[in-house]
Amino acid sequence: MNSNQIRSKFLKYFEDNDHKILKSSSLIPHDETLLFTAAGMVPLKEFFMGSKKPPHNNLTSSQKCIRTVDIDIVGDTDRHLTFFEMLGNFSFGDYFKDLAIELAWNLIIKEFGIDKNKLLVTVFDQDEEAFILWKKIAGLSENKILKINTSDNFWSMGETGPCGPCSEIFYDHGDSYPGGPPGSDDEDGDRFIEIWNLVFMQYEQITKDIREDLPKPSIDTGMGLERVAALLQNTNDDYATDIFTPLINKSIELTNSEEKANSASHRVIADHLRSASFLITDGVLPSNEGRGYVLRRIMRRGMRHAHSLGNKEPIFHKIFPTLLHEMKFSYPELNRAKDLILNILLNEETKFKQTIDNGIKILEDEIKNTQNNLFSGEVAFKLYDTFGFPLDLTQDYLKNKKILVDIDSFNKKMEE
């Protein structure tokens, strides 16, 4: 089942079960406290808060999202991304835990055909109701329902506001992968992978110490399209799915690279192209502040990896048509913005090639003077201030050489 089929099947399933399909909202949220849309519920926040009436009590969507908190390790792992799609179903006071669990279980088992013996779930340790419902509805044995007493299984919107326990559904890829079950010391391994999170929004946090029941409990769920695509395409690697392989293959072709498809650089190029293209589509332009700075940082990190493969000419605008071909039917706005995207990608990479060439010459000269694997913060600042070579790119370049930047001296120069 390819990613377009998975997205369509998810949305159609919930539409058939009395949900209204919502088109993905922009990556630029209405909520001015947020930089980007980072979860499926972000565009629906007013509905959950009760300040606005939803178009239907039950909604479903495939929401495009951006998260850059882990950008430094994107490409190094099989699952960290900056751009992703979050499949979700939401109910505003209409149904609660029992139907949410039943809908999720039936979709996974009957529609997607996932082996129930490979699944386990977690519940918040104080949520006895969810524990009982999983036993009853899914027929799971008690050793497949893990009670977790950490914030991983209690969701909140912030210090105040709607909140509640949640259940996460995990797939066990088997003992050929390292890692332990959720809640264990080695839960971050590759064996047990979370594919869906069901949030049971039943409380309102009034103050730090006061929590009250919501008059109309709600449901908020999130399933990463890339993760479930990996599972349904018999892999444990998001980058080995049909979502990424065309982009990675095009990157290999254009760079004439001997690097394999699972190299960090080709993964970064594919992921960062997706992020940049959708941000530009939603009106973000490269700049030195705010959202525009984040866009420029994403683009330049990807372009630096293209350069590291020995590529001498801009390639991002040449890979974009592959992305457009794969996603224009699900996201027609990408097609409408194609000329703008192509122009920005070409212009930014052309300008940045010169920046990279100048910066890397200085970096290589200074590496010779580096002692104790600590790169001069003053030189890192000079690269940033004089040559427009961002600190994160300096750090990214030095990471492979096991060299750290002297951040204290860099910050001191920044303050000056």
Image: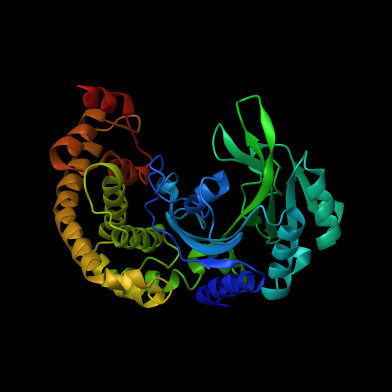
Q: In the image, residue 159 lies at what x, y percent?
A: 55, 31
From the image, which quarter does the C terminus lie in?
top left
Above or below for 202 versus 11 = above
Q: Say which quarter of the image contains residue 299.
A: bottom left
Q: In the image, residue 112 lies at what x, y percent?
A: 66, 73
Q: In the image, residue 173 lies at what x, y percent?
A: 68, 62
The residue at 66%/27% (across/down) is 210
Taking the image as shown, residue 226 lies to the left or right of residue 386, namely: right
The residue at 20%/38% (across/down) is 384
The residue at 46%/66% (across/down) is 23
Above or below for 394 versus 273 = above
Colouring scheme applied when the structure was drawn: rainbow
Q: In the image, residue 61 lies at what x, y percent?
A: 53, 64
From the image, which quarter does the N terminus lie in?
bottom right
| Any part of residue 154 in sight | no
Taking the image as shown, residue 56 lies to the left or right of residue 121, namely: left
Q: Say which quarter of the image contains residue 395.
A: top left
Above or below for 408 versus 192 = above
Q: Give whichever of 318, 42 is nearer the camera.
A: 42
| Any part of residue 21 in sight | yes
Taking the image as shown, residue 252 lies to the left or right of residue 129, namely: left
